[in-house]
Image (spheres, helix red, strand yellow):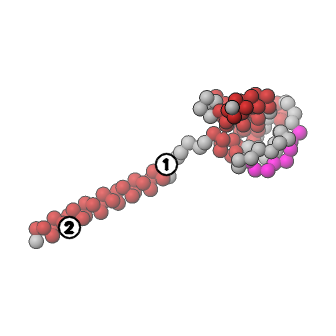
Amino acid sequence: MAAKGLVGRVASVVTAFSLVVLAAAGVLSFWPREVEPLHRLVLGAPATRDIEPRLTGGFRWAPLHAARRGVEDLTGDRLSLAAIAGEIIQTAPRHEHAAGVAQLMLGNARIAASTLEAIAK
């Protein structure tokens, strides 16, 4: 009889432990993760594009926007893109590819080309 009681208690402990582990795994699956820098650019891309070529890798189609270089053009989604791109460019040694794409999206084609060419070599 004592052995059956011990087996039952061990089974209860194992079951309780399993439930705790499963609950912890469920909570951790919803824990916020860092979004990859290139994916942040995709999400922050404005509804129009400033460069003739289209970017691939998740960027949605957008009509070409006649780029003007003025403060009045830096509103809404373009300011958001500038903020995202600026953060990514500051982390360039860790995220060179994303920094090159960010430079391109900001209209800095020469810097973007040299960055991306250096990565490709």
Residue on which disc 1 sits: 31
Q: Quadrant of the C terminus?
A: top right
Q: Nearer the viewer, residue 75 or 109?
A: 109
Q: Quadrant of the N terminus?
A: bottom left
Percent across and percent down for residue 59 are: 73, 47
Identify residue type, mark 2: Gly
Q: Which residues are magenta?
A: 59-66
Residue shown at 79% from the left, 47% from the top = 47
Q: Nearer the viewer, mark 1 or mark 2?
A: 2
Q: Nearer the viewer, residue 81 or 52?
A: 52
Label 1 neighbourhood size at 10 Å, few (<14), some (14-19), many (20+)?
few
Q: As drawn, is 81 to the left or to the right of 6?
A: right
Q: As drawn, is 20 to the left or to the right of 80?
A: left
Residue 95 in sight from this viewpoint: yes
Percent across and percent down for residue 104 are: 76, 35
Percent across and percent down for residue 33 are: 53, 45
Residue shown at 79% from the left, 28% from the top = 110
Residue on which disc 2 sits: 8
Residue shown at 30% from the left, 63% from the top = 15
How far apart are the two marked residues, 1 and 2, measured between alpha carbons?
A: 35 Å
Q: Secondary structure beneath disc 1? A: loop
Q: As drawn, is 75 to the left or to the right of 7?
A: right
Relative to 76, residue 11 above or below:
below
Residue 87 in sight from this viewpoint: no
Snapshot quadrant of residue 76? top right
Whichever of labels 1 and 2 marks the residue nearer the N terminus, that label is 2
Identify residue type, mark 1: Trp
